[in-house]
Amino acid sequence: MKSRKHNLDQQCYNRIDVERSDEDNFKAHMQEKMVYCGIEKVGSTFWRRLIQLLHKHEIRSPYSIKPRDCMQNYKSFQSQKLDNCHDILKENSKFLFVRDPYSRLLSGYLDKIFSPNPYYWYLIGSKAVEFTRKQKKHCGHDVTFPEIKGGLLHTEEQNKDRDGHFLPATDHCRPFIVQYNYNGKMETFADDVHFILKEFNLEIYTSVLKDFRSDSILDSLADTGQTFRDVLYILYIKQYINLNNELQLY
């Protein structure tokens, strides 16, 4: 952890970045003097669920909370005044998790585009198709990974239609401004989670985190299954409405 912090500090030395951090990504737990900055596709759902359990004083697996419920009772810095944000960051230990950018991009594509997700097909896929194939009014369901890369590069250059799942980590957590105490990595996620829990005297939670790999796989499958059910339900409702409209014509 010390070598990672040193490397980050070296990269940030004399780097100018005057933009304000995205307060919505920061979550504090004052009792543990902990501040976490979440980055999509880098274990953010896990940490938001765990912090939710900390607030509830419940000791159980974070995976017992459904992914779609991880934002319940989630209070970010967004409601804080700027001075309060600075004080919280100054007085508490801060950590974030990062990931190989290409691996993170591929994970985002598989989760949000390749898996059935009409919302992201429209939000990301259709715009990528419009840019790469020059086809407008496309639902984006069959957009390829190379097309997604090209489309996202275009949105970065134009600075519009950007989505948090595909933004650079520096846009989420501003490491050139915020001095982080601990820098975890997705590639060593289980070890780093246990290390950070120990640093915050939260070893009691390690007892419910014995098998990260199996728990995370089952969690991902359950979430994908729910997405499939949601899509089928939407299609069913559309078919029902269309059929009902046709019957009314007779």
Image: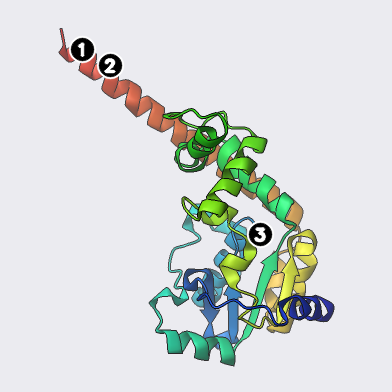
**x, y percent for residue 186:** 74, 61
Q: Is residue 44 above or below residue 93?
A: above
Nearest to N terminus: mark 2 or mark 3: 3
Q: Residue at x 53, y 79 (%)?
A: 28
| Amino acid type of the residue that numbered disc 3 sits on in the rendered structure | Val
Which of the image's four quarters has the N terminus?
bottom right
| Residue 38 visible in the snapshot | no
* Residue ID for mark 3: 42
**x, y percent for residue 111:** 60, 43
| Residue 63 visible in the snapshot | yes
Pointer 2 with pointer 3, Cβ within 8 A:
no
Which residue lies most toward the right here?
3
Nearer to the camera, 78 or 250: 78
Q: Residues within 10 Å of mark 2 (few under 14, many from 20)?
A: few
* Cα–Cα gap, marks 3 and 1: 49 Å
Q: How many marks?
A: 3
